[in-house]
Amino acid sequence: MNLPFNIKINIDFNSIFSYITSLHLQERLIYVQLAFMVISMILVGLVIFTLSKTHYLQWLFIQDMVQFFTMRPFGAKKITKQWNKILEYLDSGSESEYKLAVIEADDMFDESLKKMGYTGETLEEKLGKLTSATLPNIKQLYETHQLRNNIVHDPDYRLTLDEARKILDVYDQAFRDLQILGE
């Protein structure tokens, strides 16, 4: 079958490149180039402005510097203060304060695991993602968490000072193993 026209396609990359870089085309596209450069500068300026107003980079820099110079995780001072407050509940002599100490220690441990990136709806799910290499006392943590659940769900549950101390010692060891609390 013969077509009434004959098409020859001859692609010469040198001629295409010379056309793209030719002064004639560059003069015609100068306004498009300028428009894109202005838009790019505006967008870069907007990103820089947004980052400077959110203090996100400053916050990350401060966190890194604190961790580097103190050789402890950022926020460790706050966690230590919170832990000491929990331990003060044991000095009250009140069973309800002992229960509160256990509940808050469990919540603090759950929150710490969450901040460390362990996912799960409950503490038991988060503990399931840990190994005995990460936390040598993981079985004790399951037991103390179960005791915490008994305290929360059974209003008649009795907790002595010695039991509360043992439970908090398990959490204390876990915090130290995870390097959340200092030695």
Image: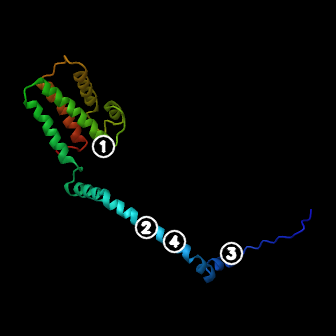
Mark with earlier residue (1, 3): 3
In the displayed structure image, the side of residue 164 where residue 135 appears, left or right: right
Task: Name the residue nearer the viewer: 23 or 77.
Answer: 23
Amino acid at pointer 2: Ile
x 17%, y 29%: residue = 100
Q: In the rendered view, would you say 43 is above or below 101? A: below
Cα gap from disc 4 to disc 3, whole angstroms = 28 Å
Q: Is residue 38 or residue 91 the one in the foreground?
A: 38
Mark nearer the N terminus (4 vs 2): 4
Q: Earlier in the sequence, mark 4 or mark 3?
A: 3
Separation of disc 1 and disc 2 at Cα? 36 Å
Viewer-nearest of discs 1 and 2: 2
Find the distance from the CA under tag 1 to the CA under tag 3. 56 Å
Dividing the image into 4 quarters, which one contains the C terminus? top left
Callout 2: few (<14), some (14-19), or many (20+) C-alpha neighbours within 10 Å? Answer: few
Residue of label 4: 35
In percent of width and height, residue 109 lies at 25, 36
Residue 111 occupies quadrant = top left
Report helix, strand or loop for mark 4: helix
Q: Nearer the viewer, residue 73 or 20?
A: 20
Coordinates of residue 85 in the picture (x, y in percent): 13, 38
Q: Position of residue 170 (x, y in %)?
A: 20, 32
Q: Which mark is residue 13?
A: 3
Question: As drawn, is 23 to the left or to the right of 73?
Answer: right
Amino acid identity at mark 3: Phe
Kindly identify which residue carries mark 1: 115
Between the C-alphas of marks 2 and 3, the distance is 35 Å
Mark 4 burial class by Cα count in 10 Å: few <14, some 14-19, many 20+: few
Secondary structure under tag 1 reads helix
Between 30 and 110, the one nearer to me in the picture: 30
Residue pointed to by mark 2: 42
Query: Is residue 54 depicted above or below 168 in this figure?
Result: below
